[in-house]
Image: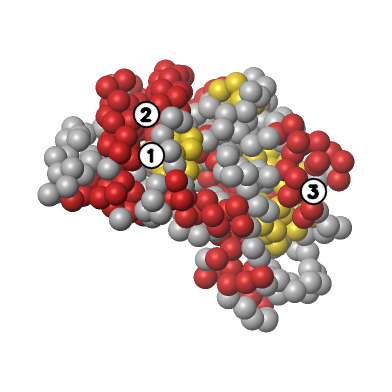
Amino acid sequence: MGKLAVNGGEKLRTRAFPSWPMHDQREKEALNEVLESGKWWYGEKVKQFEEAFAAYQDAKYGITTTNGTAALEIALIAAGVGAGDEVIVPPYTFVATATAVLKANAIPVFVDIQPDTFNIDPQRIKEAITEKTKAIVPVHFAGLPADMDEITAIARQHNLAVIEDAAHAWGSRWRDRGVGAIGELGGFSFQMSKNITAGEGGIILTNSEELADTCRSYSNCGRGKDKPWYEHYLLGGNYRMTEFQAAILLAQLTRLDEQVTRRQENARKLDQALSDFPGIEPLKNSPQVSRRSYHLYCFRYLPEQLRGVSRDRFIQALNAEGIPCSGGYPHPLYKNPLFQRKGYGPQFCPLSCPYYGKTVDYAQTHCPVAEKICEQAVWLTHNLLLGTQEDMNDIIRAIEKIVDNIDELQ
């Protein structure tokens, strides 16, 4: 019998980490208030949350949506992205970052990421810009802000819109500015796994009144601002948030500061300890990042420094010790079947769109850093970072145990 739990040894941790989502009397009272009011639809609670969250992230306007995917789709359309346009996106992100571009009838152009942040590489952005480029969608992956200084400078130089995918970044700040409010538009998600959640929901942030009004119209059946109810001006849809969701989110927002602070403190402890282990590389924090929400705690696992033992075998061993973790995305977005299929005709639009005038073949796309990260990344979910210092010590001890006994995994 080996020392590692995966080989029959004693399991290091048997206690559960904090569960998610968290709620208390605040959510119950907020829901009951809406229930008893009889006003369940797109009213005062939605308005309150839009104003509160926009202010929290330093934006002038907030427009709630059914989910974060809808927020990105509407933001792209409002920014003028359409048929024949290209939009630069990273390949290491949830599929909605790229499918939102397709929904706007535009073409996603995948640009590689930085190995030490998992965020889009500004230098690669410069190389990908063409006469058809309309916008850049940086993702603040795991809550770590992308390099918004470089990205916004590139966008200004080429007259491009910046639409931030901040679906992981509630409370994150770049140079003490809330992310999601640095570019022209930003989209957030409140899906079940997110650090502030109502089960589903999303919001668009902007500092432009014109863009805010356009987003509101698209999300509310194309209605015009201060216009008659049954007059419709845009090809919008029903992407409205309910009063129940807004009530929950208002309650969740009251504890977000405390949770962000705790996650940061625990992440710093992990960074300091794990940096001393061979083959374990925490992500880099830029000095311009003044606050980080930590939707995930990620590190790189380097098998060449650990006797060639695979990342997946390491993850299996860490789970066996009682530390839940995963490898995240198995491959970059462009390797999904959605992007690999080929054909001509309307059913393949926008990839076969005659307005584009180019051939799209994602089988030829190669982002070597993203592909390598899909083999190296280890993800710990944000609820683990809401634990105690002793919980963090267990994570550290479990990784140390595996590193010290790596020969057992060969």
Crowding at dot 1, Cα within 10 Å, few <14 / some 14-19 / many 20+, comes out as many
Residue occupied by mark 3: 126
Which disc number belongs to residue 385? 2
Residue in front for this viewpoint, 114 or 291: 114
Q: Position of residue 14 (x, y in %)?
A: 17, 35
Q: The C terminus lies in which quarter of the figure?
A: bottom left
Q: CA distance from mark 2 to mark 3?
A: 36 Å
Query: Is residue 186 found left or right of 380 in the rendered image?
Result: right
Query: Is residue 105 found left or right of 140 in the rendered image?
Result: right
Q: CA distance from mark 3 to mark 1?
A: 32 Å
- Name the image quarter holding residue 272: top left
Q: Is residue 252 visible?
A: no
Residue occupied by mark 1: 380
- Name the image quarter holding residue 217: top right
Crowding at dot 3, Cα within 10 Å, few <14 / some 14-19 / many 20+, comes out as some
Q: Identify the residue at horizontal 70%, vertical 58% (top origin).
A: 109
Residue in front for this viewpoint, 121 or 165: 121
What kind of residue is marked 2? Leu
What kind of residue is marked 1? Leu
Q: Identify the residue at horizontal 53%, vertical 27% (top origin).
A: 292
What kind of residue is marked 3? Lys
Q: Position of residue 128 (x, y in %)?
A: 77, 55
Above or below residue 191? Residue 313 is below
Q: Are marks 2 and 3 in contact (CB under 8 Å)?
A: no
Q: Identify the residue at horizontal 74%, vertical 39% (top origin).
A: 151
Nearer-N-terminus badge (2/3): 3
